[in-house]
Image (cartoon, rainbow, N blue to C red):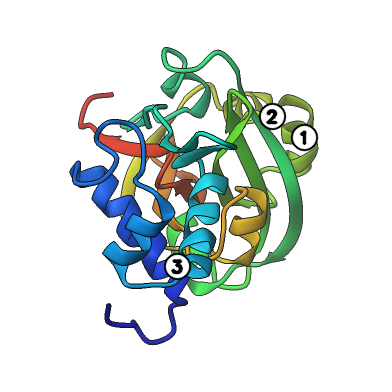
Amino acid sequence: MTRKSGVALWRQIADQIRQAIGAGTLGSDGRLPTEMALSERFGVNRHTLRSAIAALVQEGVLRAEQGRGTFVESRQKLSYPISARTRFSTGLREQTRDRRSSLLAYALEPASDRVAESLRLTSGAPVLRLETLSEADGRPVSRATSWFDAERFPGFEKVYAETGSITLSFQHFGISDYFRRSTLVSARHADASDLADLKLSAGAIVLVAVATNVDGEGVPVQYAETRFVADRVELSVSTQA
């Protein structure tokens, strides 16, 4: 096979296996061929193949059973709706038993030009940055970085740490409802922090949703970048509220 510059060979093989599974040309019966057959198919040695399979097992794409072989993990992707009222707790309610979000870190910092423009603040104005992790049925599904006007929401991080909910935190500050003004979706490789917190292996893909939420008066209250695990979540964009 042709090597892609800067991408480890085992990662390339892992991506090809994932794509073949998705296309139905590999593992359509739920089980992968033997290591020898896969090594020949992809033109790599067994060590490289094992590294690729190990990464896909860690990411939840495959399941390895000692003495039996390697199987395609049958769990379906979660469908996460993005609409005017996008909420993590309610968006996955019908698909999961348990949903929770937690605060990883926070910081007060001057707003960058991008954050300031999104929140309608002056560049350098004080903003609160939250780093959060969301899980569904014990599996990490997304990691988010959110910014808020620090003067309008003093102590927001403490309220969120107690409630684990952006919605409940806003209610604490008198915002009964808020709406999604815009969402931009893209995809990229996960960075080091996302790899660790989302329990992924190097080179894994995340779906990135960059969004701005506004209050009932149309004033921006949150600017956020959320990274979803591409093998666990699909984004469903709707124009409905």
Report whether residue 179 is seen: yes
Task: Name which of mark 1 and mark 3 comes first in the sequence.
Answer: 3
Q: Nearer the viewer, residue 110 or 46?
A: 46
The residue at 56%/66% (across/down) is: 191
Rendered position, 77 above or below 99: below
Q: CA distance from mark 2 to mark 3?
A: 35 Å
Circle 1 or circle 3, nearest the eye:
3
Task: Assess disc 1: are there few (<14), some (14-19) or many (≥20) residues with their C-alpha within 10 Å of its C-alpha.
Answer: some
Q: Residue at x 27, y 63 (%)?
A: 41
**Mark 1: amino acid:** Ala
Judge the density around disc 3: few (<14), some (14-19), many (≥20) Cα neighbours within 10 Å.
Answer: many
Where residue 70 appears, as percent x and y from the top left, is 46, 40
Image location (x, y in percent) of residue 197: 66, 50
- Compared across the picture, whether 143 is left or right of 10 comes to right
> For the residue labelled by badge 3, is the local secondary structure a helix, a strand or a loop?
helix
Q: In the displayed structure, does residue 16 sit left or right of residue 109?
A: left
Q: Are marks 1 and 2 in contact (CB under 8 Å)?
A: yes
SS class, disc 1: helix
Give, as a three-letter code, the residue at label 3: Arg
Residue 184 seen from this side:
no
Mark 1 lies on residue: 161
Mark 1–mark 3 Cα distance, whole angstroms, equals 36 Å
Image spot of residue 27 (x, y percent): 29, 40
Asked if 194 appears above or below 179 in the picture, the reply is below
Label 2: few (<14), some (14–19) or many (≥20) C-alpha neighbours in 10 Å: some
Give the residue pinned by disc 3: 11
Left or right of residue 241: residue 138: right
Q: Which residue is mark 2?
A: 164
Q: Quadrant for the N terminus, please.
A: bottom left
Please give the name of the residue rendered at 20% of the width and 32% of the height, measured from the top-left corner: 239
